[in-house]
Image (cartoon, helix red, strand yellow):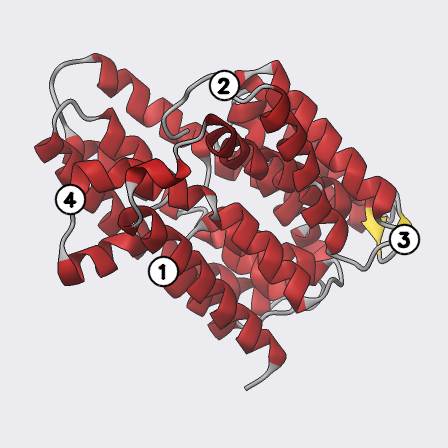
Amino acid sequence: MTAAWIAVLGTAAGCYLLKLAGLTVPQRVLASPRVRRFAELVPVALLAALSAVQTATSGHSIALDPARLGGMAAALLALLLRAPFLVVIVAAAGTAAALHALGVT
Amino acid sequence: MPARSVAESVQPRAKSNQPRPVRDGVGLGLAVGVSGLAFGAAAVSSGLTVWQACALSLLAFTGASQFALAGVIASGGSLLAGAASALLLGSRNTLYGLRLAGVLRPRGPVRLFAALGVIDETTAVALAQPDPVSARKGFWATFCCIYLTWNITTLAGALGAGRIGSPEAFGLDVVGPAAFLALIWPRLKAGRTERLVAVGGAAIALCTTQVLPIGVPVILAAVAALAAALARPTGQQKDAA
């Protein structure tokens, strides 16, 4: 089994057990407002970080690729215009692909 | 999976007294499940195989975590860092499970199966229903519909991206980051704390990229959430979205 499969199956097992734990443990265990608030905010922090890292870095360095930045600007514009999820994705990918094709790098 | 469509589909219904759990669930399932296309494409572009992408959708079945694993791998991070990011993101499902346990009251083998379906969307639909019977119907309808569409579209997206030579030529390298932005967008509009946490998390990750192993800065971004939770634990109480 390759390392990638171990990561995939380990992630799957972990995600499943996290869900099952919620249905299984007594209600009061995680009832603290701090824990609840942390769980609400973790996705915001991590997804913002992932988005920033994938947009503006390459390996260990900051890398500002115009095609990628343009794609993200298109995504932002689509979100401001209240576009649905898939329209946002297509706008981002389409803009980045067009800039890439035009040789903007 | 996009929380925006959760809010748009569920909130208007919650205001009316007529419970329509199955319609809510199926409508949401069709709308959200399609974004599996984006996950399949992002996963294969990151270097995972088609079957690894499908295994994640079948077994992990929680969109943000799946995108995170693929995203960290795509940026050259270790598999361990990718899995850790995915599990941190998956921890919110534990809280959803706590909320749902009292409504669903699943027993024995049913609980083992129901657990797989504890995600943003099923929680949103179930908790928007006025009574436990509707809540259970809404949970199962949403779960079944999203599970089917999410897995079919993951396969389609993965197969489609796999036939493309250079992901950049089709802009597939921005599918992940754009999806993340779209996923947190409803929360960014929800409050100032959310916006500060997002900016803080992104800043922490970018500032530490040059010195920490790839993938670790993203995990470290959770510090922004921790700081906000400790400073203002009450915040606004929102159910699922």
Residue type at numbered disc 2: Thr
Earlier residue among tags 2 and 4:
4
Task: Write down the residue under mark 1.
Answer: B152
Residue type at numbered disc 3: Val
3 and 2 marks on the same chain = yes
- Tell me the quarter of the picture where residue A104 sits: top right
Q: Residues within 10 Å of mark 3 (few under 14, many from 20)?
A: few
Earlier residue among tags 3 and 1:
1
Q: Which mark is residue B105?
A: 4
Mark 2 vs mark 4, CA separation in Å = 27 Å
Q: Which mark is residue A2?
A: none
Secondary structure of the residue carrying tag 2 is: loop
Task: Write down the residue under mark 3.
Answer: B211
Instruction: Residue A55: tell me if it is visible.
Output: yes
- Tell me the quarter of the picture where residue A76 sits: top right
Mark 1 vs mark 2, CA separation in Å = 39 Å
Secondary structure of the residue carrying tag 4 is: loop
Disc 2 to disc 4: CB gap under 8 Å? no
Say which residue appears at 90% left-offset and 53% top-offset: B211
